[in-house]
């Protein structure tokens, strides 16, 4: 029935619960899982004086680095035996 399951995540506890439900489905149907996180830089950061000393590129790089680490650790060890892809992309999460 299911061959591929997409699990978008914001790394919250609710997202972990949804991910675990997807893992159970994947085990039952022999499906693969794609864990997806979308990096979004809020526009308001660029208009706040406190952030004016940090170039936007550095903020984005720091956010990407943290998101990449969080995605690698998300449900790590719980997807053993299930083909799992981890995708990090940028843009509006919706």
Image (tube, grey):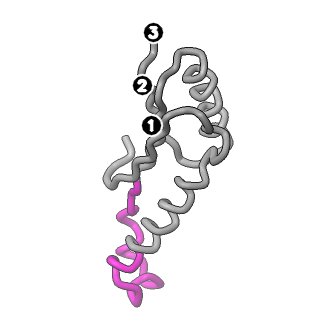
The residue beneath circle 2 is 4
**Which residue is painted at 55% across and 32% down in the image?**
82
Q: Which mark is residue 1?
A: 3
Q: How busy is the neighbourhood of tag 2: few (under 14 within 10 Å), some, or many (20 plus)?
A: some
Mark closer to the chain start, 1 or 3: 3
**Which residue is painted at 47% across and 68% down in the image?**
65
The residue beneath circle 1 is 34
Instruction: State the residue in front, 74 or 31.
Output: 31
**Which residue is painted at 60% across and 29% down in the image?**
23
Q: Position of residue 40 (x, y in %)?
A: 39, 57
Mark closer to the chain start, 1 or 2: 2
Q: Is residue 36 in the magenta section?
A: no
Give the structural element (helix, strand or loop) at label 3.
loop
70 sits to left or right of 62: right
Instruction: State the residue in front, 57 or 71.
Output: 71
Q: Which residues are magenta?
A: 39-59
Q: Is residue 47 in the magenta section?
A: yes
Q: Position of residue 31 (x, y in %)?
A: 48, 23
Residue 88 vs 41, above or below: the answer is above
Q: Position of residue 17 (x, y in %)?
A: 66, 33
Answer whether labels 1 and 3 touch (C-beta < 8 Å).
no
Q: Quadrant of residue 24?
A: top right
Answer whether labels 1 and 2 touch (C-beta < 8 Å).
yes
Q: How busy is the neighbourhood of tag 1: few (under 14 within 10 Å), some, or many (20 plus)?
A: some
71 sits to left or right of 93: right
Q: How busy is the neighbourhood of tag 3: few (under 14 within 10 Å), some, or many (20 plus)?
A: few
Alpha carbon separation for disc pair 1 and 3? 17 Å
Give the structural element (helix, strand or loop) at label 1.
strand
Single out the residue that lies furthest toward the bottom.
Answer: 53
Q: Quadrant of the N terminus?
A: top left
Alpha carbon separation for disc pair 3 and 2? 9 Å
């Amino acid at each position: 029935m299911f061959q591929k399951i997409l699990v978008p995540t914001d790394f919250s506890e609710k997202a972990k619960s949804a991910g675990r439900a997807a893992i159970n489905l994947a085990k039952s149907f022999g499906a693969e899982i794609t864990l997806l996180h979308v990096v979004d830089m809020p526009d308001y950061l660029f208009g706040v004086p406190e952030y004016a000393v940090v170039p936007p590129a550095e903020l984005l790089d720091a956010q990407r680095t943290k998101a990449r680490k969080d995605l690698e650790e998300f449900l790590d060890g719980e997807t053993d035996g299930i083909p799992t892809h981890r995708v990090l992309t940028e843009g509006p999460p919706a």
